[in-house]
Structure formats: C-alpha cells, structure tokens
Image (spheres, rainbow, N blue to C red):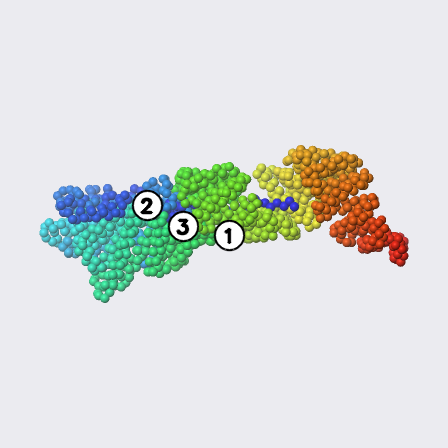
Amino acid sequence: GGLRVRNRSPSPVRHPSSNLGSISGNGNNANNRSSVDGEQSNNNDQGGSSSLHVDRNSTASTPSFFGGGIRSMSPGRMKRSLKKRLTSSSSSSNKPPPQAYTTAAGGKPPSSPEKPPMPLYPASESGTLSARGSVEDDYGGSIGDQMMSIGLAHTTMSFDVEDAPVRVSGLSAVANIGEDEMVESAPRSQPLHQPQQPQQQAPTNENDVQDADGYFINTSSFNIFESHQFLQAMGGSASGVINSSNSEQASLATNYIRTGDSLCDLKDVEEFEGAIQVYYAGLGVILGRVREWSLEHRRGEYNGENVKEGKEDGVEIEIGEDNVPSTPDASHILYNDFLSVAHCPTTNILLLAMSSILLRAGNAHFRLSQYASACRDYVSAQSYRQLRHTSKESISLEKKEFGQVHVEDAKLNGRISNNMASAQSKQGLYEEARWEYTKALQIKQGTLEALHKASSSNSSSSSPRGSLSSPRGKKDMNDKNLVADISSTFHNIGLLRMNCNEPKKAEMAYKQSLSLRVKKFGLDDLGVSSTLSALGDLYHHQKQYDDAFRSYKESLRIWKSHCGKKLDGKTAEHYYNIGLVFYAKGPYGKAKTSVAECLRIRRQLCSLNEDSLLPVAAALYLLGLIASSLGNYDEAFSLLEESHGIREKLLDSHDHLLLLNVQLALGTVHQKRLDYDAAMDCFSAALTGRTARLGQDHILVSEVLQAIGVTYTEATEYQKAFTTLEEALRIRKASPKSGVEVAETLNSLSMVHFKSGNAEKAIELSEEALDVLKSAVKFDHLLVGKALKNTGDYYQDAGAYDDAMEAYSESLRVMTLFYGREHMFLSEVLNEMGVTRFKNGDFMNAKQSFTEALRLMRLTHNKANTSAIFPTLNHLGHALYKNNELKLAAETYIESFNIQVSIVTGVANYGLKEFGTKLNTMKEQIATTERTEEEATELSESLGGIASILRYLGLVIQEQGDFEAALSANKLSLSVRLCQPFKENAAIALMAETIAMFEYKRNNLESAMDYFNQALEAKKSYQGESTIDVARTVNNLANIHFSLGNLDDAMELYQEALEIKRHCLGDDSDEVANTLNNIAHVMVNAGREQEALKTYHNVVKIRQELYGKSHVSVAVTLASMGDVYIKLGKLEIAMTYFEQCIRIQKLRQDHCDERVLENLGSIYGKLGEWHKAESTFKDIIDLKRMAHGDECLDVAKTLDLLAVSYIEQDRYADSIEHLKEALRIRKVCLDGEDDEILASLNKLAFVYKSLDMTEQMLEVRGEFEVIQARRRQTS
C-alpha cells in the first residue's frame, strides 16, 4: 500500500544533548564538596572565610615560638626539635641563653582603610620599641643566643594559586586559576557568599564553629581570664603581694579578650582582622605582666631580698595610640623569665592564658583563610603550654586536684592539635594533618577518661576548691564538651580522608562522629546535622545517591528543628544538595522542586545581603540545567541568562570559569532550540576561555568539544563532528576516572557513524559505550538510557527488531527513573518502539505504543507543540490501517492533516473540503511571496508532509470503498506537490500515476492519459530519458492508446518502452517479455496474426528460460496463442495450446482460467469431442459457483452447454437435471417473462419430446404458452 513509517521523524521532541549538560568534572576542593556552582573552599564566590578580600600587604603580627614557618617541617621533626630546644634551654646553665623574643619589622601593622590600626607594640615618640628598665642593662650587654626567638609572624591572606598545594582528589592545581573559578559539580556544606548571620551551633559545644568546607574549629569553653587564678597572677607581685595597678591590667586583658570574641561573633572580614589585633593587644598586656614579674623576680634574686609592693623601679604600663596599652619590649624577655613564670604556682596560669589567646588568634586567621598564620599561632600556643608543663610541681598539684584549670589545659591541648591539623589540611599538608588529628584524638580521649576516673574517685568525698567533680553541672558540661570535641575531630578526619581520596575511611570517621554525638546528645543535635551533611557529600561523590539523599534529608530535618521557619543559607544549601542528588539520579521533577526552594530562600536572603547574589546565581544555574534536561528550553534560557548577568556583574574577569560554565550551558540550550549559530558562538567563547585557563588537554576542555561535536552532528556536518569528538575522546581517555565522559563521547561518535551510513560501526561504538558505563557507574545513569535508545535505533535500522526492542525497553525503564512516567521525552522511545513493532509486523502492539506516545505528548504539563504530535499521528494511522481499523485510521490521518495545514497557513483547518477552498489562495501566496532559500526549503518540506498524509488518507478511503473520495484526496495530494517551491518530482510522478490508474479503472481513458503523461514528464526530469521506471510509464501510456484503439501510437510507445527495457535489463528479462506480449496484442488487433505468433513465441521462450516450462506466465502466453489460432480457424492447434495452458494452471495453482476452459469446451464441441466437452463444462460450473455462487446466470449458461453435450451424446435423460437447474436459476435472477426463461422452457420441452415424456412436455409447453399470453396482453 505504499505506507512508509519513518525511523525517526523530524520532530522537535528532542532529548537533552548527548553530552551530560553542564555538571562536569569536580571542583578543586579535594573532598569534592563543591556544589554545582563551584563553591570551593577558597572560592571568591563563597560566603564565610573565602569571600573575604584581605589586604595582601597586611602585616598584623602573631607571636610565634619558632622564627620560621612549619610547612617544610614534618610532625616528627617538629616534635623532636621542640623537645630538644626546650631541654637544652632548661637543663644546662652553661649554655648560652636562648635568643630574645623579637617583634616583626616595623612593629606596627599597616592600617585598614576603614579602621584605625590596633598594634601590639606601638612605637614610642622616638620611633623605637623600648621600655624603662631594659633587660639589656641587667645583663650588661647584648643578650645574643640566650633569648629564644618568637618573632611575630606576618598576617597573610590565603595563598596565591601558583603557590597552592596540589590536591589529592578533584582537579589538580592549575597555574593562574583560583579555586573560586573551578567548575561546578558536587555538593558542599556551605553555599557561596552566604549572608552573614549568627551561626547556629550545637548546644553541646556552643563555642565551636564550622568553616565553609565543614571543618570544626574548636574554641575555649572555660574563660580563664575571669578566674581567680588569673586575677591573682596578673595582680600579685614576686613577693606575693597584690598590686592594685596590675589588677587593672588583668581587667584590661580580659576586656581585650572579650572584645576579640565579640568581634569574631560578628563573622565579618574586617571584624576578624580587628579581633586578631585585639587578641594580640591582650597578649601584650600579659607579656607586660610577665616582664614586670620577671624584673621583680630577678631583682629579688640579685638583691637577696623580697620585692616590695607597688611599682618596682618605675616599671609601669603606658597608654599608647587608640587606647592600646604600651607594653614592655618583648624582645628583652628571657626564656628563663618564662621558665620562672612557669615554675611559680601563682603565675603559671599566665602561660595557659597566652596559649588560649593564641588559639583564639589562630582561629581568627583560620576563618580569614590565612592558614599559614593560623598554624604559626597554634604552634606558639602549644609552645607556651609546653613551657608551662616544665613546672612539674605545679602540674602535679593540678593533676591531683583535677580542677577546672587542669581540665581546660588538657582540652586546650587537644583543640590546638585539632585546629592545627585543619589548617594543615587546608594547605594540602595531609600527612602532617593526619598526625596532628591522631594526636588530638589521643589527647581528647585521654582527658575524657581521666575526667571519668577523677569523678569516680571523688564521688564519695568533698572536692577541693575549684575542682570540677564537686559541682555536678560542671562535670557534665566538661564531659559533653569533650565528647563534642572528640566527635568534631572524627568529623574533621573524615574531611581529611576525603581530601586524601580515602572514601571508605572517611565514611568510618563520619560514622564514629555520628555514633558519639547521637549517643551523647541524641538524634536532633546540630552536630549530627553537620556530619550527616558531610556524609551526604561523601555519598554523592561516590555516586551512592540513595544514601546521599537520606543523609541530606535527615540533616535538613535536624537543622529545621532548630531554626524553625527562619530563612537561612544552610537550609537553602540542604535543598540545593538534595536537588543535586535528584539531578544525578532522577527524577528531574524532584530536583527542580528542591532547587526552586533553594532559590526562593536565597532570593529572600538576597535582600538582606547583596553578597548572597552569587548563591542565587548558583541556584539559577542549576535550575537552568534541570529545565534544559526536562526539555523546557525557554525556561532554561531565561534562568541561565539571569545567572550569567549576576556572575558577569560580580566576578572579576570576563573569562572567569563560572561565567564560561554558563556560556556552555546557554550554548546547549541554543543547540536544542536548533539555533546552531548562537550555540557555536557560546561554545567558542567557552572553549577559548577554558583552553586559556586550563590548557588544551584538560578534561573540562573536552566537555566543550563534546558539545561542539554534538552540534555539528545535529547540523549534519559529520566530518567536523567526527574530528571534534575524536579529540574530545582522546582527552577524556587520558584523564583518570572519566568513564562516564568517555562513554558519552563514544555514544556521540556512534551517532555520527550511523548518520553517515556506517551502521555496523555505530553499533560497535554504542556497545563499547555501554560496556564502559557498566564499569564506571553503579546505578541507572541517564546516559545509559540514551545510549540504549541509540543502540535500539541502530538495531532497528539493521532489521534486528528483537534486539532493538530489548534496547528500547531498557532505555524506557532508565529514562522513567529520571523523567517520571509522564514526561514527553519518553514518547520518543515509545514512538521508536512502535516503529520497530510496525516493521516487524506486530501492528496491534505498534498501535498501543503510538497511542501511549500521543497520550504523553498531549498532557498539559508537557506542552508539546503540534509539530511534535503529527508525525506520531501518522504512524498511528499506518498501524490502524494495517489492523484494518479503517475508520479510526481515516480519523487519525485527518487530525494529522488538519494540524499540518494549520502550521502552514497559520489558521485552523477542518477537513479536506475546507482545505480545497484554501488551496488556490495558497498557490497564489506561494508563487508571489519572496523567501530565503532556508524558508523555501522549510515550506517545501511542510507541504510535502501534507501531500503525503493526503496520499495515505486516499489509500484508507479507497479500502473503505469510496473511490470518488479516494480519487479526490489523491488529486489534492498532487496539487499540493505541485505547489512546493522545490518540486519533488518522484512524489509528483507517484501521485500522477496513481491517479492515472484510478481513471483507467473508471474507463476515463483521456484523463488517465493526461496523468500518465504528467508522471512521465516528472520521471524524465529527475531520472533521465532511459530508465526502467520511465519505460514502465511509457508502457502504461501505450496501454491507454491501445484501449482507445490508437494502435499505431500504442505500437510506437511499446517499441520505445521495449528499447529502454532491453537497454536497461537485457533481451531476456521479464520486463522485456511483458512489453513483447503487449506488442503481440497490438499485432493481433491490427490483423498481423503471424507476426503476433512469432512475438508470442519469443515471450514464451524468455519466460520458459527465466521460470521454467511450467510457469503460470508461460500458460498465459500459451492461451493468447490459442486465441490467435482460433482467429485463424485452426481449432486443433488452438486446442493444443489451451490444453497446455490448463495443464500448467492445474499444476501450479488451485484453479484454472474460466475463459480458457470455455474456449476449450467450445472447441471440443465443434470438433465433436463431447466427452471432453462435458468434463470441461463441469469444471467451468464448479469454478463459477465458487466465484459467484449457485444463483448466477453464467452458471445457468454453462449448465445449458453441459446439457447440450449430453444431448449430443444421446444422453437426453442426463441433460434434464441440468436444464431444470438452469431454468430455476433464470427464474430467480430474471423477470418471469424474460426470453431466456422461454428459451430454457423450450429446450426442456424438446428433451421431454425426444424421450416421449408427453405429460411432462405438455406441462412445460403449457407454462411456455402462459408466459407468451401474458407478454401479448402487456404489449
């Protein structure tokens, strides 16, 4: 019937690009905690520490126990060096004294542009750092090596990229690229540029905070500076007498610490910087006290008498600029002075206070991303603790009493190690960090065990003053703080393990942290929420998306139970990360809902702080990717444009990688909207930027090449696509852990080969892509669904329908996981399943597939445009036609027809009749309107679709028996074809020839001739003059002339057709035999019987050589030759040919030709062979009864002939039965007075008379006379 089901209709219903969208690679954050928008730990896009813009020339100073940095010193070497120096300084009085403390060059940090400086050691009027009563005078000269250097370290911002350590996991550090520019991929625990809000901490350890990467920073919980011991140490003299002036210094130091803590609580960049200065000022006050106490102590030693109460030798504290105290010159404090302070039970606590201050200052540096400075502060803090512990007597007394000071000292020790390790991890010093975390855990766990032991031993006795075990509340608080400390260290170890690419060990650490917290504080602890979030990041990184979702969901529940309905960035981040999980594993609908909620929260927070605009851009970007994946390209374009606008405004360079990410995503959207020029512009910008920033062999460059290759494929530039995708594949194969990316490119290359006609290579690459995916992912990846869809297409094209169906079914299952059960993209797979079933002859199931595909397209939320629907309507119509559901098929075709007409005309159409009235107007518009070549091509294709559906509709209507309506549909189809700007002559010829055959069957020979001539002209225009198809049309045109009696014209055309056929096919082809047969017919009708017989002999010879002597086509020609011999009067020869024809027909088919049998029976009769005639007539009667039934006049006529054969054999009695049956049939079929009835009665009367059956004869004659009488009366 000419039905053609397209493999893949040119429907705008399209999947997202075969590339995976813009989520690619992973960020520079080692534990892959970056969110899709690249919120890295040192990211300028990010809130918290990494959003800070710190002056690169800042020189705020930090007391440091060692003069050099710690980055090049291993933990073991550091420990041995510290132990050696402490031992050599305290054990040998003969050795030179250690080097004096020194200050940073200049002594004074540069001022902040908005805040006056807060220096530790402001210069005196002379510009030198000095204090009355210099230690140098006491020693009578230079101190030299007897003083230990604790030079004040410079405060520096986070490292430049060139100096950044290489991460173990994620992207390696690349020259000239900041971590703020890395590509979006995985979730993180803090969003970009979070609005500054008070961070909600776990109630179990309220002073601990988390940085942007989720590291817990331990702080002090017991305020030493408000304790009686600290007040006594600051206010007492060497003689033990309280000095009121120094008591004021204790308050001043305490106020500095309070001020620094308050500034840190504000979580602002400048406030952190100010807090560092204030902490150093407080440290300066304590150093002044140490200097003062040491002078008193030395004077007492030198004079052999106790120091008196009051100012000693005029030593006092001056007030410098900005109300910051001027302290004694730290460069003149001897190491032995600190040892003396350490060995004094009263002043020993000052070293603990100094350690606590340096912990605070280090934490402030940490939160400013100044990790090297933080490490120096932490090392100094530990150094002061070590000095303090040189006093065995004091420490032994503390241990015995196990008071609050001893507990604080132990906790401080563990916290310094924890924070030191975190700072080292931030710098990529993972081995050093691993050692420090181990030490921190040992210290914290040992302290907790000692606390429990002391509590147990003191439970039945009264506790000493200041002990922790006496007040039950303090004991519980210390216990909880220590458990929280331990769990936070386990949490940090998990982050470190992720940085070191040890996910299994990281998971164990996180679970240990969770176990401790849940057991001690319950499921709703905020620390549990933080660790669950980190665990979700780990699972996301490992592609364990179900586990990641459960972790994020529970973390969000806990967080919301604490913050309630209050909007905050952490809640938004949870929704963002949950959206990432669904974006990776599906369904996309849930991903969209989660990210939309994140965007809503971030937009509201944006009004509170403009810094939150970049997180808004991140959410817009991800939401744009999701919309693109769902096929909502207009929505995706709007979201991505807004994201690009925000980033372009806030980021520092036009080639920032985050901007290039949006360019890539926008290019993909343009490509899906078939705007290839705009897509290539975006891709070109992204490729140029990424290549310049990352190098041409970077995995992220291959992502852009992948997108470009797909676009070339869509634009049918296959050679360019092949070259581009091969380059992308080379890069991806060279990159570690890029299995999904390699599979993506292999899948795209397979499509290029398929569209280039190399289906075998396409199948090979597609199967290779699936094998790579199976080993690379442990879940149903969307790319698996797409690759299976393509594989199904290739198998379908190769005719392997079972394999194709298997691939399509699995593809549909995987895609359903991502898109849900009612997304429009599923309709494409269902449509191809229907096509495969149709080609395989399974029309019923094909109908079901097409019906389901249409249902999905018509759903309101899918918003499928009509241009996407009509191809599937066409396919459904074909399936219905094949199922013989002609009415439904016609209705389906008409619906498709109306849609296509409305697309072309711009107005609704209702049926063929209305279209017929529009056609002339359309012709005029098409002929007079100027169009570009592209517009003309598009219009021509649309008109071709209308013409095709009219042809299909004509077929269905013809099957329904309405030949006039079918002819009308075909003529409309031809008229539309003739309107096409670019004529499709093949289709024109087909329709013209179809109409010509209709007219020929209706005996409208002149009209048929016109359409055959039109078909012939169309064929010659695109095929040439001498093709076999042209020859066939010439042959058909000759048939029309033959039927019209134009024998000369017919012969001329037959000869032309014969010449072309012999030229194309040779002399012995069946096509040549057919035309020779027609030529013989013309010769017979022209009276050229002998020439006709020669031509028939040639036909028989060709057909016998082609098919054998007993082929049915040979029988047909033999019958024609018999007809010629009858015409020549040679009945015996004619009988021979007819008998050969009947013999072949009985041998090769289940029936014989009635006409040949009738001719043969007549010849038998004329030759007197009545027995053969009788047998022949019986065969004819059986054939006619089978073909027309019992009550047919032709049967009656043959019954008469059979009766005649009996009469001729003198078998009158046998003829009676057949004559009666013939009479009965005529009475049923004819009017009662018909001449045939009278003739039949007359024959029967003759037989009765011959048999002397008078009574029967009279009865028949009476009936004969009655009929004649009636006829006379009526006439």
The 10 Å Cα crowd at callout 1, few under 14, some 14 to 19, many 20 or more, is: some
Q: Amino acid at mark 1?
A: Arg
Q: Label 3: which residue?
A: 542
| Residue 1066, position as x, y percentages in the image | 67, 34
| Residue 631, position as x, y percentages in the image | 51, 48
Q: Which of the labelled discs sits on residue 741, or is there none?
A: none
**Foreground of the two, 86 or 323:** 86
- Separation of disc 1 and disc 3 at Cα? 23 Å
- Separation of disc 1 and disc 2 at Cα? 44 Å
Nearer the observer: mark 1 or 2; the answer is 1
Extreme-left residue of the structure: 304
The 10 Å Cα crowd at callout 3, few under 14, some 14 to 19, many 20 or more, is: some
| Residue 1035, position as x, y percentages in the image | 71, 37
**Foreground of the two, 425 or 112:** 425
Determine whether label 1 and label 2 are within 8 Å by CB: no
Classify 211 as above or below 1071. below
- Separation of disc 2 and disc 3 at Cα? 21 Å
User: SS at mark 1?
Assistant: helix
Residue 1231 visible in the current orientation: no
Nearer the observer: mark 2 or 3; the answer is 3
Q: Label 2: which residue?
A: 428
Label whose residue precedes the other's in the sequence (1 or 2): 2
Residue 344 visible in the current orientation: yes
Q: Amino acid at mark 2?
A: Gly
Q: Label 1: which residue?
A: 813
